[in-house]
Image (cartoon, grey):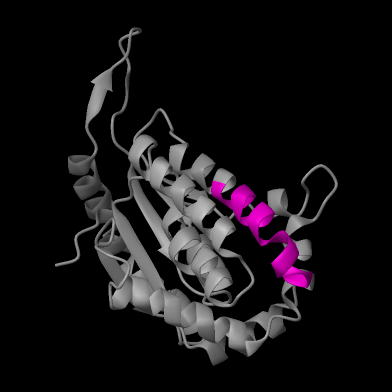
Amino acid sequence: MLGSSLHQLGNLTQLMPTPDGTTKSQHIFTIAVEGNIGCGKTTFLQHFKGNPKVEVLPEPVDKWKSVKGYNSLDMMYKDAARWSLAFQSYVTLTMMEHHENKEETPKVKMIERSIYSTRHCFIENLHQGGLMPDIDYNILGEWHDWLNQNSTTDINLIVYLRASPQNCFDRIHKRNRDEEKDVPIEYLNSLHKLHEDWLIEKKRGELPAPLLVIDANLDLEDLQKKISQMEPKILSGNLS
């Protein structure tokens, strides 16, 4: 099944000659894996990491935790009102690095979250929660508008790992990451609603790519089985 799905992918990827007579990809099939904190994105991405045709780009958390000696992620969680603009500016930069990343051989590029969820979910959540003033929100909005018009932000498929806030909360506490240990359920409720507004209700406008929704409320073992079953559909982008 994997071979057939990658064959279909080849039909989506056109090659162009280079000066040395070889070829490189003119188009990389890009998948954005979206969802709340603790929804199962790590499990999803881990499934594809061993596939030589798939380039997996996890969220650049290590960069966020080490900005010339500063842990911007921890600072953001501890004092969002003070650090939201700085943190989301850096998130935007590092997510754009993933969007712009190109390999010379045809591949599926799978990125954890995207420039779109950065804006429509996380920046929006800070603003709605009163933790980002209007001026900061408007500046980031103009910055994102410019990027969408002038940079490579195209994606070909959105995979939404749809999980309840309570399940996400339970998983967060089970994995016990230092920066996340004090994340309240109310925060997860807000993010869940924003993901639903953006991806399901389309209240933020038309989506930038077709949407595949996966029920991520399953326990992790069953979620892994579900991902395996859906692998050909995910890698081919054939949602019919």
Nearer to the camera, 229 or 158: 158
Question: Is residue 196 depicted above or below 236 in this figure?
Answer: below
Question: Does residue 66 show up?
Answer: yes
Farthest bottom residue in view: 166
Q: Main secondary structure of the magenta part?
A: helix
Q: In which quadrant is the N terminus drawn?
A: bottom left
Q: Residue at x 34, y 35 (%)?
A: 106
Q: Residue 175 in the image: x percent, y percent? A: 70, 78
- When the figure is inspected, residue 191 is found, relative to residue 123, above or below; the finding is below
Which stretch did the figure color magenta? Answer: 76-92
Q: Is residue 148 magenta?
A: no
Q: In this rendering, would 232 be left or right of 43?
A: left
Whether residue 49 is visible, yes or no, is: no
Q: Is residue 212 left or right of residue 172?
A: left
Q: Is residue 91 magenta?
A: yes
Residue placed at 75% from the left, 81% from the top?
182
Residue at horizontal 72 percent and vertical 60 percent from the top: 83
Which corner quadrant of the image does residue 154 belong to?
A: top left
Quadrant of the drawing holding the C terminus: bottom left
How many marks the image carries: the answer is 0
Q: Residue 237, position in %: x, y?
A: 24, 57
